Image (cartoon, rainbow, N blue to C red):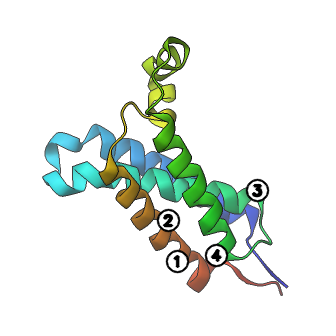
């Protein structure tokens, strides 16, 4: 039976979180294109890893679909600008998780990040249990 090992998934999630925060804090020093989509690709990869942690026996394609639906849902929620959700977004972690404004380019970055993690997951992580 195939599965993902939770310890490794959590470790990859933490590494992605730290890498994502360092990229976001280094944006002025990165090439424009990388600073534009890099943090969003990493965020989407973290979503993929999170679903992998929650559903360790679920196949890679299903995890990818869940991740895309979640990421696209968060991006579409940025079209909603009620005061209560803007208050949540005004906090650092609220803004990092929920974002601030809808961008079509974010949907592309999420797709790229999830596709990359799905490829790595299928090749190296989602393995036969021994």
Foreground label between 1 and 4: 4
Q: Earlier in the sequence, mark 2 or mark 3?
A: 3
- Where's residue 48, x and y in %? 59, 60
Relative to the observer, which residue lies in front, 39 or 72?
Answer: 72
Q: Residues within 10 Å of mark 1 (few under 14, many from 20)?
A: few
Circle nearer the N terminus (1, 4): 4
Query: In this figure, which residue is indicated by the disc labeled 4?
Result: 61
- Which of discs 1 and 2 lies nearer the camera? The answer is 2
- Image quadrant of residue 7? bottom right
Front residue of 72/92: it is: 72
Mark-to-mark CA distance, 2 and 3:
16 Å
**Which residue is more in the foreground, 15 or 44?**
44
Secondary structure under the numbered disc 3 in the rendered image: helix
The residue mark sitting in front, 2 or 3, is 2
Mark 2 lies on residue? 114
- The residue lying at 72 percent from left, 76 percent from top is 59
Depth order, front residue of 40/4? 40
Q: Please, what secondary structure does the residue beneath circle 2 have?
A: helix
Quadrant of image for the C terminus: bottom right
Residue sitting at x 85%, y 85% = 1
């Amino acid at each position: 039976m195939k599965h993902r090992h939770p310890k490794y998934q959590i470790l990859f999630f933490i590494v992605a979180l730290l890498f994502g925060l360092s990229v976001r804090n280094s944006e002025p020093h990165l090439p424009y294109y990388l600073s534009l989509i890099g943090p969003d690709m990493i965020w989407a990869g973290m979503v993929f890893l999170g679903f992998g942690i929650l559903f360790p026996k679920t196949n890679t394609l299903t995890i990818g679909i869940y991740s895309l639906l979640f990421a696209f849902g968060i991006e579409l929620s940025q079209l909603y600008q009620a005061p209560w959700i803007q208050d949540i977004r005004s906090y650092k972690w609220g803004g990092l998780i929920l974002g601030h404004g809808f961008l079509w380019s974010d949907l592309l970055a999420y797709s790229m990040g999830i596709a990359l993690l799905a490829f790595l997951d299928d090749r190296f992580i989602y393995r036969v249990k021994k």
